[in-house]
Image (cartoon, grey):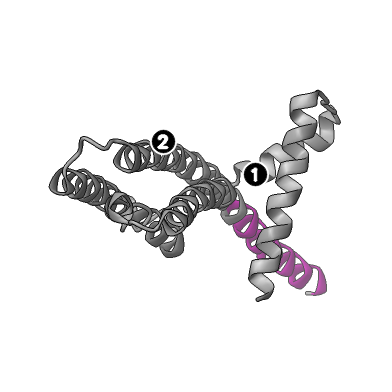
C-alpha cells in the first residue's frame, strides 16, 4: 500500500514538474519571438524619429518655406508617426509614443521668433528632445543593455582626440542637465 502511494505521489509530482517545464519553455519561446518583433518595431521607430529630426531641421533652416508650408510639413510628419505608433501600440510604451509624437510640435513656429536668444533656445530644446527620443528608443528596445553587455565582454577602449573631445562635451552636457533638473 505504501509503495503504491509513493508511486502515485511520484506520478503526480512528475506531471506537475513536466507542466512547469513545458510552460517555462513556451514562455521562453514566446519571449524570444516578442523580443525579435519589438526590436524590429523599435528599429523602424528609430528611423522614423531620425526622419522627423531631418524634417524639423529643414523647417527650422529653410527660409523659403512659407508658414503654411512649414505647418504642413510638420503636421504631415506628426500624423505619420502618430498613425504608425497607433498601429504598433501593442509593443510601444505610452511614454515613448507620446514623446515621439510630440517631437515636432511647435517647430514650425521657430522661424517666426524674433528674439534670437529665444530662437536659439527653442532649437536647442528641439535637438535635445530628438536626442531624448533616440535614447528612449535604445533603452526601451533593450539595445542599450545589449551594447553594454558586449562592451563589458570585449573590453575595448578607444581613444583619439575626437573621442576625448566628445567625452568632455558629453560630461559637460550631463552636468548642465543635472543642474537644470535640480532647479
Rendered position, 166 above or below 22: above
**Magenta residues, start to end:** 2-22
Going 83% across and 33% down the picture, which residue do you hit? Answer: 153
Position of residue 40 measured from the top left corner of the image (x, y, whole percent): 44, 37
Q: State yes or no: residue 60 in magenta.
A: no
Q: What mark, if any, has residue 47 been given in the picture?
A: 2
Q: CA distance from mark 1 to mark 2?
A: 16 Å
Callout 1 secondary element: helix
User: Residue 45: x and y, percent?
Assistant: 40, 43
Indicate whether 75 appears above or below 8. Answer: above
Q: Position of residue 154 (x, y in %)?
A: 83, 28
Secondary element at tag 2: helix
- Residue drawn at the location 31% of the way across and 58% of the way down: 106
Q: Is residue 71 left or right of residue 137?
A: left
Residue hosting label 1 = 144
**Relative to 120, is 177 above or below?**
below
Q: Residue at x 78, y 69 (%)?
A: 6
Q: Nearer the viewer, residue 92 or 114?
A: 114
Near mark 1 (Cα within 10 A), the count class, few <14, some 14-19 or many ≥20, is some
Residue at 75% across / 68% down in the picture?
Answer: 4
Amino acid at each position: 500500500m505504501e509503495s503504491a502511494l509513493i508511486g502515485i505521489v511520484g506520478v503526480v509530482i512528475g506531471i506537475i514538474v513536466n507542466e512547469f517545464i513545458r510552460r517555462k519553455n513556451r514562455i521562453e519561446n514566446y519571449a524570444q519571438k516578442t523580443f525579435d518583433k519589438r526590436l524590429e518595431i523599435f528599429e523602424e521607430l528609430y528611423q522614423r524619429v531620425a526622419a522627423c529630426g531631418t524634417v524639423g531641421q529643414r523647417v527650422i533652416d529653410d527660409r523659403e518655406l512659407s508658414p503654411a508650408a512649414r505647418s504642413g510639413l510638420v503636421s504631415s510628419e506628426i500624423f505619420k508617426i502618430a498613425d504608425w505608433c497607433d498601429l504598433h501600440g501593442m509593443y510601444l510604451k505610452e511614454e515613448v509614443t507620446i514623446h515621439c509624437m510630440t517631437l515636432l510640435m511647435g517647430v514650425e513656429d521657430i522661424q517666426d521668433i524674433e528674439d534670437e536668444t529665444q530662437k536659439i533656445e527653442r532649437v536647442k530644446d528641439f535637438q535635445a528632445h530628438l536626442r531624448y527620443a533616440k535614447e528612449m528608443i535604445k533603452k526601451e528596445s533593450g539595445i542599450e543593455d545589449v551594447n553594454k553587455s558586449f562592451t563589458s565582454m570585449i573590453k575595448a577602449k578607444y581613444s583619439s582626440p575626437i573621442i576625448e573631445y566628445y567625452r568632455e562635451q558629453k560630461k559637460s552636457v550631463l552636468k548642465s542637465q543635472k543642474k537644470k533638473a535640480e532647479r
